Amino acid sequence: MAKRDKLTQRQKRQVLKQQKQRIKNNQSAPVLDNLSSPYDGLLISRYGEQADVLRLDNQQKYRCYLRQNLGSLVTGDKVSFRLSNEGQGIVEAKHDRDSLLQRPSVHQGLKPVVANINQVFVVVAPLPDFSATLLDRYLVAIKDADINTVIVANKWDLQTEIEKQSIAEQLNIYQQLGYPVIHLSTKSGEGVSNLKNRAIEKQSILVGQSGVGKSSIINQLFPEQTSLVNSVSDNSRLGQHTTTASQLFLFENNQGFIVDSPGIRDFGLWHMNYHSVAEGFIEFLPYIGSCKFRDCKHINEPGCEIIKAVKAEKINHQRWNNYCKIVLSPQE
Ligand SMILES: Nc1nc2c(ncn2[C@@H]2O[C@H](COP(=O)(O)OP(=O)(O)OP(=O)(O)O)[C@@H](O)[C@H]2O)c(=O)[nH]1
Ligand SMILES: [Mg+2]
Ligand SMILES: [Zn+2]
């Protein structure tokens, strides 16, 4: 009996707390009358205090306000939301995430980028110039989040035979490590169906430098919708940061989705220690733990098995070089 009383007391406190929270929420969100019962939704794109949410049972998109106590909400988040008579939505709850890709930002610490994805397409191209350093930084961050990577070599039509050979040699290193590489051209259509086959039934994101053609790929996959595309500057050979917010595109019949993301120039990894960085270089894994010193950073220590493997050409020299660069200047 006493036990039951105690429980009831606790329940009462909880109800009171919930009531207070509800009052607090109602002060910060607009008052919407005659709200529907809750729907399951998928967050497509976030715009400050509002978001576009896809209602899963009818595939309709609704602009929604967000309750204030939801914590961070990003593209890919599964949510519960209600609708007013006028079709205005309000997101009330965020469901647990299966995965979260984050990137460090100078002012905000670790910033969530996208939730619930299980595959990242890292897009590279000859224009803007291919950067193996940036690619390696992506691979480390994606491995840290325990997500699969596919490398997409876009603008394959632009390449001369010599360029093709040079970039193919670079990408060959990654292929040998087991990363799938898709050669693609959004102009000729080459490789688009290959990418689609890999994307269907999965939850993916396209990442890469501004101007490599992420939104152009979306436009090939979803011709009835459009993502804004802009040219790469002739002078700087850099993209113009055309896409400004991540946006989710759903395949027909709920067969997975793919997220277009804003291009980035650099990818800091200063939130990671050298051990996690080393684990992101998957060819290091067989050697980690067998160096002479337990706290070996694999940069210039005596008895380092990884350096030995580099010298024996079992590990690619450029990859090890990029590893050292990340550990020595993670903020770049
Ligand atoms: N030749 C060629 N040009 C392409 C290809 N794909 C995209 N482009 C061009 O590359 C430029 C940049 O394309 P976007 O799709 O806007 O690039 P993005 O990666 O979305 O750029 P951000 O949104 O700034 O991150 C545009 O001028 C496209 O027409 C391709 O396969 N071949
Ligand atoms: Mg874009
Ligand atoms: Zn070592």
Image: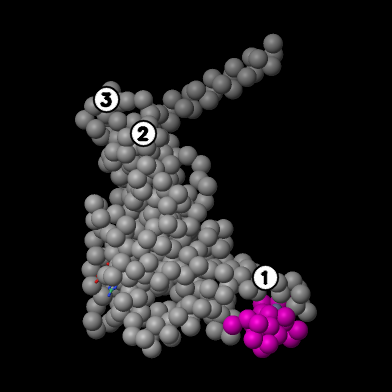
Judging from the image, what secondary structure is the residue with disc 2 in? Answer: loop
> Between marks 1 and 2, how big is the CA–CA gap?
44 Å
Q: Main secondary structure of the magenta part?
A: loop
For label 2, the crowd category at 10 Å Cα-Cα, with few meaning under 14, some 14 to 19 and many 20 or more, is few
Residue 118 appears in the rendering: yes
Residue type marked 2? Asp
> Between marks 3 and 1, how big is the CA–CA gap?
57 Å
For label 1, the crowd category at 10 Å Cα-Cα, with few meaning under 14, some 14 to 19 and many 20 or more, is few
In the image, the segment drawn in magenta is 295-316
Residue position marked by numbered label 2 in the rendering: 57
Question: 39 or 216: nearer the eye?
Answer: 216
Residue at the image position 48 percent from the left and 81 percent from the top: 170
The image quadrant where one finds ligand 1 is bottom left
**Quarter of the picture holding the N terminus:** top right
Which coloring applies here? one colour
Q: For residue 80, which quarter of the picture? A: top left
